Image: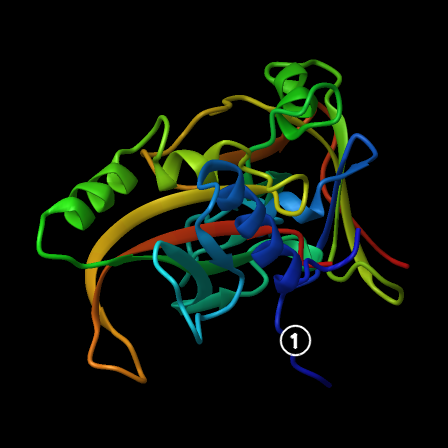
Amino acid sequence: MSKTILTDAKVTIGGTNVSSLIRSVDVQMSVDDVDLTAMGGTSHAHGAGLRDDRMTFEAYQDFTAVSGLDAICSPLLGSSTGATVVVQNVSTSPGVTYTMVGVLFEYHPLNGEVGAASMTPLTFLPAQGSYITRATV
Amino acid sequence: MAATDPADIRAGIVAALKSEFDGAQVTGYPLTNGRPPAFDVDLDDQGVNYDMSMGRGTDEWWFKVTAVLATGVTDGAQRARDAYLVSSGTGSVKGALEADRTLGGVVESLHVTNMVPRTLGASDTDALYLGAEFTVRIFANGA
């Protein structure tokens, strides 16, 4: 058992390592809570429904042509195919990866006030048929 | 990339100031024997905020650049300091430092955020100087 201070999570989007731009990360794995309660029951019956995962990042924006975060994320808005998004708890092995094919349903390329660091919030939802899978490396 | 060396940041700031203020004494460290007009560079009280992004990607550095001008019986020094305070153009400290926000590729981004006026005293005499202290916020690679 050991505790960890999160400073070295590795994030790749479509194969590009964007970790140095990532300020915060939230890998959310969840399933719908389906109510299966029936007459005669004394408490709610919960059934595991469909997966409803997402990955949320707070990132420094980077407008570098081709390789910058904006160039990577812009095509993913409303994309039907998406891009593989991988989050690893540390950049080295051994580690745990969380992977899904993600798409963006909203994108805020510019989001901030004067004098502040240019940040962009990113929320990746699974492309159709995809969900977050866990693996060890 | 290697972690950003504060000595390189200081050198970048010095180069930017020298390119604008030819003839002024400019040092990357606190002045010990100043001859106004002069500039020095020191860490701001806000210091360094490490790990602003994952994987040692970004550190936030805070520096202060202090301009020192001799006082006199006329308002010449005050007028000269006023010229430093203009936000851009010839003779502007903010303009000089932000002309290349990467300091020649040493840092990722630089922003002169504010200025406060100072009255400075020499350590070895009773002389007083006019000063202007500029706060410089820098994002630099941490790994």
Please tell me whether residue B93 is drawn above or below residue B58 in the rendered image.
above
The residue at 32%/34% (across/down) is: A113
The residue at 55%/40% (across/down) is: A60
Residue A35, position as x, y percentages in the image: 48, 45
Q: Quadrant of the C terminus of chain A?
A: bottom right
Whether residue A47 can be seen here: no
The residue at 53%/50% (across/down) is: B13
Residue B105, position as x, y percentages in the image: 68, 40
Please tell me whether residue A86 is drawn above or below residue A2 in the rendered image.
above
Counting every numbered tag in the picture gives 1
Q: Is residue B22 left or right of residue A11?
A: left
Q: Is residue B28 left or right of residue A64?
A: left
Report the colour scheme.
Answer: rainbow
User: Nearest the camera: A93 or B37?
Assistant: B37
The chain holding disc 1 is: A
Instruction: Check disc 1 and report its element: helix, strand or loop.
Output: loop
Residue B51, position as x, y percentages in the image: 59, 62
Q: Is residue B102 left or right of residue B37?
A: right
Q: Is residue B107 left or right of residue A41?
A: right
User: Nearest the camera: A37 or A123?
Assistant: A123
Residue A117, position as x, y percentages in the image: 44, 41
Please tell me whether residue A23 is drawn above or below residue A109 in the rendered image.
below
- For badge 1, the amino acid type reads Thr
For label 1, count other residues whose C-alpha is less than 10 Å away and answer few (under 14), some (14-19) or many (20+): few
Q: Quadrant of the N terminus of chain A?
A: bottom right
Which residue was labeled with disc 1?
A4
Whether residue B13 can be seen here: yes
The residue at 46%/56% (across/down) is: B25
